[in-house]
Amino acid sequence: MNSNLKRYFQFFLVVLAAGSIYPLIYLRGAYQETILEVFGISLTQLNGIYSALGLAFVVGYFPSGWLADQFSAKKLIFVSLLACGLAGLWFAQIPGYNTVVIIFVIWGIFSVFTFWSSHMKMVKMLAKKEEEGRFFGILDGGRGLVEAVLATVALFIFTRITGGGSGDVSALQGVIYMYSFIMIVVSFLILFFVKEEAAEAGAEKVEEEVKPAGVKLNAETFKKFLGNKYVWLLGGIIFFSYSLVWTMWYQGGFLQSVINIDAVRVAQVMVFAMWMRPVGGTLGGFLGDKFGKSNILAISLVIGAVGLVALAVAPAAFPNFFFEALVVIIHLMIYSIRGLYWSLLGDCKIDGSVLGLSIGFVSLLGYIPDFLAPVISTWLLAGFGDAGGQSAFFIFNAGMGVLGVLLIGMFKWQLKKDGT
């Protein structure tokens, strides 16, 4: 196998892993009201669960970078998928609230600490400089394609096999089992088919780059990335962008609880919206390579923010199709955003010896909304009620997206000032 095919094959497996590990964790996107009924919990409690998940994420992002610089990415990805799959089997037993919190913490640890920086570093190393926009776009778009296929299978299970009523325990269990078994299967595909040793002439450079370097944690190491202004700027861009992205997991619940669309129809709309991910992620990546990654990211943020405000303020008496179409458009922009913000990594002038640590630190800054967004949602629900709180949450995060656009402008200005 030549070096390019080897790169693409490894990239495909990374995409498959990334597309398999997160859908069950964020099952609330399409099945929020069903989860609330089946597990007998409130929306505030569900937000608390996701706050615990977010805290595990925030704690895990930075050390995940150190881990990626020390150990085999293949083994880290295998362990991550296997642990998340086994936790999913536990979740399918419909345990009590406290146990569910523990399961989500386990997911938080193994989907970030052992997985996140490892898979991001491998993609960065596998992509040539001129391919970074499309590689990160295809990573998110390809991951979205995997998620969309799995979501379609889940929808079939939810609606056709067991009826799929909003409180149908067996329907939800079938969905959870499917996602859990897929993760376990993919973990063994990674274990058996990813080869980290150089085996073909011409592939050694790629293989050497994706192997762990063994970085020492000392003052000089920290100075290499903490002293890099682009690392801080990228962390801020992702923070504001990801705040807008976080609204995607509330839109299904909004359609059902505020607009009064039935559970099965909401699931259908959200699954269709998931199919926008391969479109938005891949298209955003290619447009970013052609017209500038930061330019397309900023445009996507603006359109997404306008869509969120429209979703929040439009009268509920409007036809259901209006809200459904709006959600699909917002998701298209969100997936473009997710496919692009990490593509700016190649402009950050990061020392290769601390790439994993840098990714971990940027992730620590950028993904704070994983913890913060559920807290803000709970606060807004308490202050404005169910419908008003959800609308206020959309408007707040639209504003965060606009702040992200301003920070992108600063990033571009700094690059121009440095003559890049």
Image (cartoon, rainbow, N blue to C red):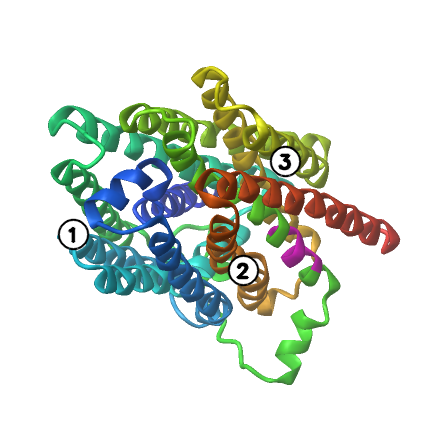
Are dots 1 and 2 in contact, CB under 8 Å? Answer: no
User: Which secondary structure dominates the residues rendered in magenta?
Assistant: helix
- Label 1: element kind: loop
Label 3: which secondary element: helix
Q: Are marks 2 and 3 in contact (CB under 8 Å)?
A: no
What's under tag 3, amino acid-wise? Ala
Q: Residue at x 35, y 24 (%)?
A: 261
Q: Residues within 10 Å of mark 3 (few under 14, many from 20)?
A: many
Residue 44 position (above or below residue 270): below
Asked if residue 197 shows in the view, the reply is no
The amino acid pointed to by label 1 is Ile
Dot 1 or dot 2, earlier in sequence? 1
Which residue position holds label 1? 94
Q: Position of residue 147 (x, y in %)?
A: 35, 37
Query: Magenta residues, as a range?
Result: 233-238
Count neighbours of disc 1 (C-alpha within 10 A) and say few if under 14, some if 14 to 19, many if 20 or more.
some
Q: Is residue 398 above or below residue 314?
A: below
- Residue for badge 3: 305
Q: Nearer the viewer, mark 1 or mark 2?
A: 1
Q: Quadrant of residue 111?
A: bottom left
Let me know if residue 237 is in the magenta part.
yes
